[in-house]
Amino acid sequence: HEGDGGTRHTFILRQGRGCPRHKYHIRSVREDLKMPTSALPEEEMKLAMDMLESNVSAAAVRRVLHQRGNGNLSDDQIQNIRKLAERTKGEEREAEGARTPAENILRYLEKNNISHVALYDEPESQLLTIMKPRADNLRKQRASDQRQYPGGKVKIVTRLRSGDDAFETHAQDVDIASFIDADSNDPGIEKLDDFRRRERARLLINGNGRKKLLLAVAWSTDSMRAMFAKFPETMAGDITFQTNSERRPLWNFSGKTSSNKTYTALCAFLPSQARWCFDWVYRFALPAILPREALNRITLFITDGDDKLYDPFIELISQLFPNARHALCVWHLIDRGLRRKLSTRNSSAEWERVYLEMTTWLYSWSQEVESDDEFRVSFSLFSLWLERPSTVEALTPANICALRDYIQVSMLPLREKWLQNEQRHSCRSFDQRTSNIVESEHAAMTTSSLGPRPCFPI
C-alpha cells in the first residue's frame, strides 16, 4: 500500500476477513517484517538433516530438537531443513558426478563391503519388465515392456568377502536359455515410450565407455550370513513391493531361530516375477553368497502357492539342496484360497460361525493329524459335516460346491506339501507351517520409520 510521501506500508490481518480500506489491519513498514527464526548450532542442524534424510517424521525431529534444548520449531522450519538437506545432497551428487540409482546401490554395497551378486545385460535388454500404473486404477499395474526374449548371453558378477578387508570378484557369461524357459516368450512387441525409457535409464551402469543394464542384484551382509550358518533348517521366500520408486520386486530369503525369532539371510531386487528370475536366485545367487555347508542343511523351504516361485527350487533340490523339501504355506492355501473361491455377499453371524468351524477343521489337517489314517478319517467326517442341512443352509449350496471343487483340485493333489506330519518328525522345522517368517520380515521393514518407502530409489 502506498502511503503519504511514497512510503510503502504492509498491513497484517489482525481479525476478521479485512476490507479494502484495511480497517482492521496493523500498519507497518514492509522492510521491518520478519518471519520467526530459530538459530541451530551446526551439530544440531546436521542431526536434523540426517534424521530427515532417513525418513524420520517431522514430529519426531521436532521433539528430539526440543528435548535437546533447541526450542520448538514450526512445521515450515522443519520443511526448510528438509529442503536444505535435499539441496545439499543434490550438490554433493553433482560434485561427484551424476549417478543412476543402479550405480548408487552397487557403490553402496562395495563401499560397505557387502557380498553381492549382480546380473547385467545390454541396455535394450528385453528381460526387464517395466511396471506402469493403469490410468483407471493406480493400485493395479500391468507389464508394459514384456516382449519376446531373444537368444544371447548375460553377465553375472559376484563379489564375495575372502578375508578381513579383502574381496574376490568373479565374472561369468551365462547363456539366457540356461535358465529361461521357452514358454516365457511373450509375442507382444510394444514400442518403448518416454516413461519406459526413463525407467531404463535409472538402471543403467556407465563404465569403461560402455553402458549395461542392471537386471538384478542380490546381497547379504556378514551378520546375515552368520545367522544363516547357525539356523538354516527352516527357510521361507517371498516377494514384496512398495520398497522402491523403480517398482522392482524385492525377494527376501528368511529363516527362523530356535528361540522363535526371525531373520533375513539374503535380499534381491529382481527385474520381474517371471520364473527365470527365481531360477537365477536359486541357481546362482544363493550358492554364490551363502555358505555351501549351510545350504546342505536346509530341510524345509516354505512358499505361497505361486508355482513360478517354488518350481525352480524343486528342480534344483538334487543339485544344490540335497536335504531340503518344499512345503506350501497353510495360511495362503486355506485362508486366502477360500476367500477367493467362496462368496461372502450374503454373510451373516451364522455364516461366520460355520466358516470359522470349517477353517479350523481344515487347519487341523496340518496341525493335529499325525498319520494318513487319521487324515482319511477326518476327511470322511468333514464330508459328512458338509452334507448336514445346517451347514448347507449357512454356507449356501453354491459355496459348498465351490469348496468341494477347491479341495479336490487345489488341496488334495498337493497333500504332501501341506500335510506335514512326516516333515515335523523328520526335520528341524520348529513346527513351522506358514510363511509368516518372511511375511513378518516384510512387515517390519515396510512399517518401520527407518524402512524403505515407495518413493525411494533402489
Image (cartoon, rainbow, N blue to C red):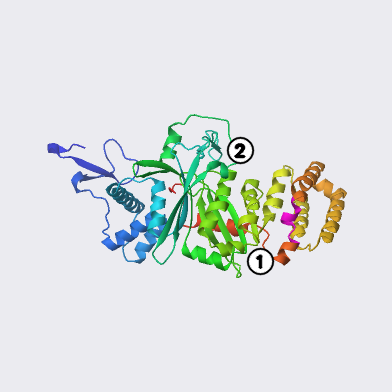
Residue 417 highlighted magenta (yes or no):
yes
Q: Residue at 57% of width from left, 65% of height from top?
A: 293
Asked whether, in this view, residue 288 is left or right of residue 371, the answer is left
Q: How many other residues sit within 10 Å of disc 1, few (<14), some (14-19) or many (≥20)?
A: some
Residue type marked 1: Phe
The relative height of residue 93 versus residue 200 in the rendered view (above or below) is below
Q: Nearer the viewer, residue 436 or 394?
A: 436
Is residue 179 at least partly visible in the picture?
A: no
Judged from the image, the secondary structure of the residue bearing numbered disc 2 is helix
Residue 46 picture quarter: bottom left
Q: Is residue 28 above or below residue 147?
A: below
Q: Nearer the viewer, mark 1 or mark 2?
A: 2
Quarter holding the N terminus is top left
Instruction: Name the spot of residue 154 as percent of width and height, x first.
Output: 48, 43
Quick one: 79 or 221, which is closer to the camera?
221
- Three-letter code, disc 2: Ala
Return the x and y of residue 251 as percentages of the image width and height.
Answer: 54, 52
Badge 1 is on which residue?
A: 430
Mark with earlier residue (1, 2): 2
Q: Residue furthest bottom?
A: 259
Q: Is residue 159 left or right of residue 321?
A: left
| Residue at mark 2 | 182
C-alpha span from label 1 to label 2: 39 Å
Answer whether labels 1 and 2 touch (C-beta < 8 Å): no
Q: Residue at x 78, y 48 (%)?
A: 407
Side of 372 relative to 256 (left or right): right
Q: Secondary structure at mark 1?
A: loop
Please report the bounds of the magenta region as a residue range. Answer: 414-421
User: Is residue 18 at least partly visible in the picture?
Assistant: yes
Q: Position of residue 333 (x, y in %)?
A: 70, 51
Q: Is residue 327 magenta?
A: no
Residue 58 percent coordinates (x, y): 40, 55
